[in-house]
Amino acid sequence: AVVVADPVTLLARIGKTISHIQIDPVTLHLSESRILFKPIGEELQVSLAADIKSQSGFFTLGQQLHRLPLNGSEDASQLTLGGVLDDTPTAIAYDWLTNKMYVAISTIGPDNSARIEVCEDVRGKKTEVNCAVIMHDRLDYLHSLVLDPLDGNMYWINAVQNQVERAFMNGQHHDPHPFLNPASSEGATLTSLALSREAASLFYVRTTKDRSELWQCRLYERQSCARLFETTHVLHLAVHENFLFLSLNSGLLAICEYSRCDASFHEVEQISELEIFEIVESKHANDADVNPCGSHNGGCSHICLIARIAPKRTCACPIGIRLRSDGVTCEDGFQEVLLISAITGLFYISLDTSDYTPQAIPYQGHEDSSHSLFDVDFDPVDGFVYWLDISDTAIKRCRVNGSDLSIVVKEGVQQSTKTFRLDIVGRNIFWVDGETALIWVGKMDGSLTPRILDVTTKLENPHGIAVDANGGSIYITDWTERSSRIVKMNLDGSNAETFYALQEFSYPTGIELDVEGGRLYWAESNHSLIRSIKLDATDLLSYMQSSYKLVQPYSVAKLGNRIFCNSMAGRSFVEIVLRDGILAGHDSSRVVESQIYGPVGLRAVKLNEPATLKGACAKNNGGCNHYCLNSPSGEARCLCARDFELLHDGRSCVKSTSHVLVLDGANRRSDMIRMSLKGPRNLDRLHLQGLSGMPHDIAYDQIASTVYIASGNESSGTIEGVNLTSATPSAIIVTSGVALKGISHLAIEPHAKLIIYSNSEFGRIQVCSLDGNHAKTLAWNNIRPTLVDVDLVRSQIFYVNESVDISTIS
């Protein structure tokens, strides 16, 4: 018979609940059961831990660590674990000696990577705590983490290699083979692990298709593992005094003495649907005598960890913060970070430490997974992170800590906008619309209406953008199906030309400018290459190795001697280390599994380095009323916001009140130019979108601020309307068809909301409503009309008949 000295308390998952249960020591029946938390979805994985000193139970649910008082009070709390969506806590273990929580975080994916974090005291009612990454390199998906604080070791099951592994509790001296298992792992899975200080042993469950085996390994004897017992499938295992506690696949709890499990095996009555559990027991060591972190936190500024070797403790820092050379003090914060925009959110990775653990930037609403973020940049002057939110078609900003969230720009940002860059000197934002092949500029504080740059060369499919704010230049990657190139232009769009022509089918995407190093870097998606060239378009270099397996590189970022590049085809990114501008060696670069789903934009920055601002725009906005753009000569080039005109002084902007509209068909893409009637001759292109044909006449409705355009070909004609109040004027078809073949000229009667148009092909003067729904013919007898106009005062229509005489219609 089994005889347990004292009542045994368990924190257990029973069905859809977390419950507090107690086993009677004499009858081995359930003597008490109390639900602490419900409901829990059956499909959700849960890990458990307990601390008897604070009477606290802990369990994970998704990325949340819940703390529950075991005495049934209402003093519960929860914390968020992991930094990204797919970070999954797969095991927790409580260090009762230093009061810290060890958390195993694993990622289910192609790499099955994992890390172990240690979080400071989680017993209080806290919503945030500092955690340190103590293990990450060559660590596979793991579970069943157990601690031995008195010896300073921790053990776990490597689910990928199907083996027990060990390391010091400070993460040092990882031993993937502390025990030699005489049994073959083929066809069997290690499913649970438990540690007994009394027996100086590890116990684990080895499960096959039909049965489970219980094994015992003595802690420091590599060849000591032996099978103890075989039974039906075991879900979970724990040790208390001389006894093994087992949750069976049937949902029952079983107890046996580990030295004679066959003879003492007993199933506890009145318990069902039991899955995993944690025995709540007191530890017998005197904390004050053996806790190396007990006095003044072991001298550590932040997190003190148990170590097996003198001085029996090491110090650690919160995720991403570097430990100073004194070994006890953490830096005040991050120095270098990699900012990442993804379809799942906005993240940063500290480059100060080697673990590269991604963390979410916690701006208000960042948990909303419906947002797709497509690019990111940083302003070193005011300390804001900017990002492009395609879901909201807006550019937003916040601090690195998530505070001061605001929408900066919405007008002009489309679903087809994929990249942007900051001009920190002129305080401008440039963004690229790949579908319309337009370059936009707005203000970094959103104070002005954005406008489109008049680029002096035709872009086909612009993608990446790099801005030299001090030097006054923009670099754009642009490609068609066969040709690829890098275009260079001034910040105002002038002097645009091909900077460097790439190989066919290169498909360049992201681009990065290193002004200090005098080079330009870009990704070639089709060739899976990173290339660079000097700013005089010489010395082309390539950076990529087949071992990186980075398919379709997308964004490029550079900081110091390191290049970072991601892929749209996976979660990883490549870190390439350079020496004198070339690869430092095969072992100096690595592929980093970031666990971020859908990474798109990258930006590597120094957070606390003062910005270098040069050129005329660095002081007083260069004297410009609106946009100040540095030119390559160092002078300021002033531009006005949309619907404003630049005066003779070249700096002042006034609202446009009168202008002439000119139809321009000189380029391959027809457009309209607005020419001011006052002041200097400002010529502003309207960048019309969606015109269906070659236009040959326009008419303006001043009341609705809408231009109507007549176009046609050999078989049909079209009338389209364009509202000029829109940031991106787009043509909408009013009416079209064979009946409009030969349409010649237009006139508008705005009060009656009519379009009058001449048709020289069919010899008619016709009229239709502004929406095109109603139409009729006004004149048709022996006429061949061309030009047409309307006298609103006399309510008369004038038209030129066969270019000979002028006739009227009332």
Image: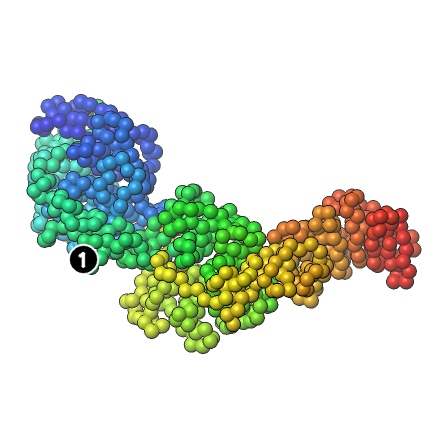
Task: Specify the amino acid type for callout 1.
Answer: Asp
Residue drawn at 17 percent across, 29 percent down: 9
Q: Position of residue 53 (x, y in %)?
A: 16, 34
- Viewer-proximal residue among 759 and 191: 759
Q: Position of residue 582 (x, y in %)?
A: 35, 72
Asked if residue 134 lies left or right of residue 640, the reply is: left
Q: Is residue 232 above or below residue 438?
A: above
Question: Counting other residues with Cα less than 10 Å from the Cα at mark 1, is it few (<14), some (14-19), or many (20 or more)?
Answer: few
Q: How many marks?
A: 1
Asked if residue 183 lies left or right of residue 637, the reply is: left
- Viewer-proximal residue among 741 and 654: 654
Residue 14 visible in rendering: no
Residue drawn at 87 percent across, 58 percent down: 800
Q: Position of residue 405 (x, y in %)?
A: 44, 46
- Viewer-proximal residue among 316 and 167: 316
Q: Is residue 588 above or below residue 322?
A: below
Residue under numbered circle 1: 326
Q: Looking at the image, what colour scheme do you see?
A: rainbow
Residue drawn at 65 percent across, 50 percent down: 725
